[in-house]
Image (tube, rainbow, N blue to C red):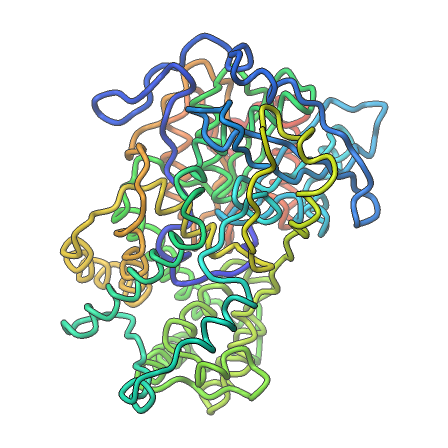
Amino acid sequence: MNRPTRVTATALALLGALSLTACTGGGLSDKGAPKTPATADPASRADLGAFYGQRLAWTECATDGYECARLTVPLDYARPGNGRTFVLPVARAAATGPGERIGSLVFNPGGPGAAGAGSLEEGMDEAFGAAARARFDIVGFDPRGVGGSVPALTCEPAEEEQETETEEKEPTAEEDEAPEGVAPLYPRTEADRSAAAAGARTAAEDCEKHSGPILRHVGTDDAARDLDILRAALGERKLTYLGWSYGTSLGTSYAEQFPRRVRAMVLDGAIDPSLDWRQRVLSQSAGFRRSVDDYAERCKEIAGDRCPGRTPGEIRALIERLYQRAEREPLPVAEDSSYAEYGGMDATAVLDAVSMAMYTPEDRWEPLSEALWEADRGDATKLGALGDEEGTESEDTDTTEGEGQEDASPGASEPPAVPAVPADNGDAALTAVNCLDVPHPRSVRPYWDALAPADKAAGVYGTAGVTAELTCRDWPSGERRPHKVAAEGVPPVLVVGTTGDPSTPYAEAVSLAEQFPAGMLLTYEGLGHTAYGRGDACVTAKVDAYLVKLERVAPGATC
């Protein structure tokens, strides 16, 4: 049940990060795959001892029924003793059957950019089956740079700073008179492509300006190292883990770096680490196109008379019509819509709203149908509301810099600098992690070359996905390369794949399960993104039996 705080055009392009890098003492082989991890336990390294020696100090969370703590990890694992750290929020829901408690079950809700601690306080523990909740403390944490992490990522100025910049900048006469263009979903002309590349460069520069010191330290490989420090701080000899969507990349990276530290691992909504950026765009965008076709074909089953067309063909035509209109001129919205300040919904906003609805058909297809119907008749307000996921507010970072901060930072000589971060930094984190984790071309030519194949494979979902990747062209790059999983010694890992998943297509789950030694695949024949936690009793029973009793799933298992 990955419920991203917001799905943007970037999310369409590359939702998950590809895992690489070995654990301390390892490195990269000539082909980019991890070498066999060193046998030395990272916890035995003198320069990591203070971090691994932490024990979490639990206190009541702001939300009743949960406990909260903070975990300190090095900002740079190459120089863990330089005093620079991340302080990560952690939350837990205690096992409901304490007499039968096995230990802690750590989860990642997806993204990248979703805050695990905040998600838990919002009730994420209820996504787990009763058997899992009875036997495990459910633990969520905000990955480095995400949510309430200190420091945290931002690619935009804080509200006060933004107001100052706006006041100081006076538009030229040409800027004042020229109407804003509507970005096309398929930039065909040189002018459109130049504008897209310039916009992407500006976005990357904004992130560098506001988060430059930490941009190179928010990748999935480092987050997986943090996960091992969390395991130790929880007092667990081995990790029990469940990751949804991007959380499968985090889990895969952990399994590669710490294969013998895994007790049980469930990866739901899998991302295949062997795909490069272009293959990943084609895979995901084709998944969204298929899901929209599924919506058109099966709308009547869920939305009934609210469907915006009498036939699948009519529904497809209406959606296409809205994209075309929005490319010419933003679709009108009410004055109180968040899109009113932009003059309405442009084509990318419409595509985002439609795509977001594909994540949970049971919740979204009915309101999507009504919103499409009204948008086609001239009012896109409800469609805009579908694209406005209510973000999870980050914790007040000012409080983390106060009393007790130095004690919570092993090796720190002074508290880390705390940037002013918007309440929801999910979009910034999504871009930052994806761009850092996945190698991207520096020239614009490969992106333009990818447009026609993307259009053929997935229409506007493909071309919009390719264009969104342009931001990564000007981004700091990490050391990862597409590769097959290398996790010798890891116990059987359970991969869950949904046949109608729009964002992490089923084929990637099949591939990931095959790459793990003794990997197991559980197939859920259904629609929507991910399977566990969405109410299917069969999936819940099989996943819980594996988590609690380490019961293997038989080959070909299907729910």
Question: In which quadrant of the rendered view does residue 79 lie?
Answer: top left
Q: Position of residue 158 (x, y in %)?
A: 54, 62
Whether residue 44 is situated above or below residue 363 in the rendered picture: above
Whether residue 531 is situated above or below residue 546 in the rendered picture: below
Residue at screen point 81% across, 23% down: 100
Count of numbered tags: 0
Which quadrant of the figure contains the C terminus? top right
Whether residue 223 is situated above or below residue 124 in the rendered picture: above
Q: Position of residue 379 (x, y in %)?
A: 50, 88
Q: Nearer the viewer, residue 323 or 339?
A: 339
Whether residue 378 is situated above or below residue 75 in the rendered picture: below
Q: Position of residue 387 (x, y in %)?
A: 52, 70
Q: Nearer the viewer, residue 173 or 124?
A: 173
Quick check: 173 left or right of 43? left
Quick check: 277 left or right of 78? left
Q: Position of residue 246 (x, y in %)?
A: 47, 43
Quick check: 467 left or right of 250? left
Q: Nearer the viewer, residue 419 or 109?
A: 419
